[in-house]
Image (tube, grey):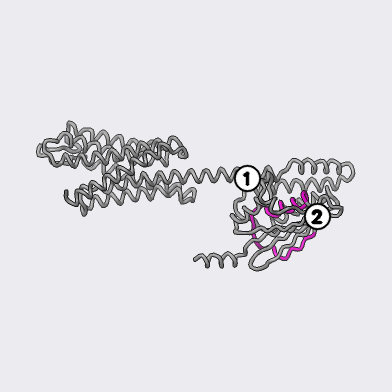
């Protein structure tokens, strides 16, 4: 066996094994949507068939008595290629119009059994192209351009790179076709087949990336609901409404002011849930201040002092307010004179927010490791780290008080960290 034949066999066996493994994985993969999974599975089987039939066609070329078999294998390959491209397109669009071109191609090449309009195999077992012999090439070219255009249009609208991924697959297939047409390589080795197998693998990866994206979005939505349910606490709402109701009889003007503040608090709370990016500190501070003023109406024994030296920075929404809420609810509310100090400054390349109270304190290790049902310090710490590379430090002494420090890296600190990574 010569080296060229051995290389061709090795290549085709490798392609077939890849397709078999991919087909098996697709069948058991429950994460991809069922309709997309079946389309991809059907396409893998069709590509598998083309690889095998192509080799049978090459065998038929070498034997003059296999004219009819060569006609059938050539028909199959010409008919199958546009269908493969259409199935790839179906993975990214529900548009059924590409099927019209695939059906037209099928009708043209089906005539090879009784006319020479597409092609014919002579008695000498030579392939002769008919008047419509390049129909498959033209139709496949149109479909490939179409296949490139669909994700580009989606990318233009959505501005998300993942939508552009199928265009890269189409360009790989086009490049493989150009290599086959060039005639620089052994005709028994089809770059198109390599491109189609690569395309199937890439589409499987692309579909999985879409699942990951949707899964992450679902987790993010669940997180937003968790934050909403924890922040808009029924007890706080009921108690505030009860306070407003009582003030209506004793101090209507103060009741009006409290109701206005409560409305502002709810509006800011809900509005913050839709913000995945950072928000200005001034916005978060105003939200905290409104919440604090409502609580101080309910609990006149509480006093909050502010020392704001630095406010020109951004941080995740609903970061400072929950810390102050914890200080009130779990710390100073029980004190005869409960005090909270909020200090904001710049130190060591960080914007530092320090919330100190003289509350009852707690065991930090036990609290941070607990599975808290409410929006606690553990969640704030995770959001700070993931959204801005920030830090959260907690110090607490039972019966003395608690100090929570929020650290948000300054732009200079972020730039310095990026340079070190490089």
How far is the residue under mark 1 from the one under mark 2? 34 Å
Say above or below: 97 vs 147.
above
**Residues at circles 1 and 2 in contact by the CB criterion of under 8 Å:** no
Residue 237 visible? The answer is: yes
Say above or below: 19 vs 368.
above
Q: Position of residue 337 (x, y in %)?
A: 86, 55
Residue 101 visible? The answer is: no
Badge 1: residue crowd in 10 Å (few <14, some 14–19, many ≥20): some
* Residue drawn at x 33%, y 50% as measured from the top left: 172
Q: Which mark is residue 72?
A: none
* Residue drawn at x 40%, y 39% as measured from the top left: 26
> 33 or 162: which is nearer to us?
33
Q: How many badges with numbers are in the image?
A: 2
Helix, strand or loop at mark 2: loop
Q: Quadrant of residue 12?
A: top left
As for residue 193 lying within the magenta part, the answer is no
Sequence-wise, the earlier of marks 1 and 2 is 1
382 lies left or right of 130: right
Residue located farthest toward the right when viewing the structure as drawn: 250
Q: Quadrant of residue 83?
A: top left
Q: Position of residue 24 (x, y in %)?
A: 38, 38
Q: Nearer the viewer, mark 1 or mark 2?
A: 2
Residue topped by disc 2: 399
Helix, strand or loop at mark 1: helix
Badge 2: residue crowd in 10 Å (few <14, some 14–19, many ≥20): few
> 8 or 264: which is nearer to us?
8
Q: Quadrant of residue 73?
A: top left
Residue topped by disc 1: 224
The magenta segment is 305-330
């Amino acid at each position: 066996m010569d080296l060229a034949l051995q290389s061709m066999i090795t290549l085709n066996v490798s392609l077939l094994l890849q397709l078999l493994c991919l087909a098996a994985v697709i069948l058991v993969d429950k994460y991809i949507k069922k309709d997309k999974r079946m389309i991809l599975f059907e396409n893998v089987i069709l590509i598998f068939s083309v690889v095998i039939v192509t080799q049978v066609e090459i065998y038929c070329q070498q034997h003059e008595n296999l004219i009819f078999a060569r006609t059938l294998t050539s028909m199959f390959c010409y008919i199958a290629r546009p269908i493969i491209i259409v199935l790839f397109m179906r993975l990214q669009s529900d548009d059924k119009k590409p099927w019209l071109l695939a059906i037209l191609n099928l009708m043209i090449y089906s005539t090879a059994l009784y006319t020479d309009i597409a092609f014919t195999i002579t008695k000498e077992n030579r392939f002769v192209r008919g008047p419509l012999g390049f129909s498959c090439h033209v139709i496949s070219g149109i479909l490939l351009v179409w296949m490139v255009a669909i994700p580009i249009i989606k990318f233009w609208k959505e501005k998300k790179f993942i939508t552009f991924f199928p265009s890269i697959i189409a360009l790989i297939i086009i490049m493989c076709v150009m290599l086959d047409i060039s005639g620089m390589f052994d005709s028994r080795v089809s770059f198109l087949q390599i491109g189609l197998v690569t395309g199937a693998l890439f589409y499987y990866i692309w579909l999985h990336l879409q699942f990951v994206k949707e899964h992450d979005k679902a987790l993010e939505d669940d997180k937003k609901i968790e934050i909403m349910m924890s922040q808009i606490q029924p007890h706080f709402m009921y108690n505030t409404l009860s306070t407003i109701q009582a003030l209506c009889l004793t101090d209507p003007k103060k009741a009006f002011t409290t109701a206005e503040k409560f409305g502002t608090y709810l509006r800011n709370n809900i509005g913050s849930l839709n913000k995945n990016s950072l928000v200005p500190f001034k916005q978060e501070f105003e939200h905290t201040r409104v919440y604090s003023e409502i609580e101080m109406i309910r609990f006149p024994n509480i006093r909050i002092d502010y020392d704001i030296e630095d406010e020109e920075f951004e941080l995740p929404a609903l970061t400072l307010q929950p810390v102050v809420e914890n200080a009130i609810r779990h710390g100073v509310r029980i004190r005869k004179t409960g005090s909270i100090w909020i200090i904001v400054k710049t130190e060591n390349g960080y914007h530092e927010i320090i919330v100190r109270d003289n509350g009852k304190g707690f065991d930090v290790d036990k609290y941070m490791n607990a599975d808290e049902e409410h929006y606690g310090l553990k969640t704030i710490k995770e959001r700070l780290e993931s959204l801005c590379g920030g830090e959260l430090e907690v110090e607490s002494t039972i019966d003395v008080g608690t100090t929570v420090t929020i650290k948000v890296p300054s732009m200079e600190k972020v730039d310095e960290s990026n340079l070190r990574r490089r």
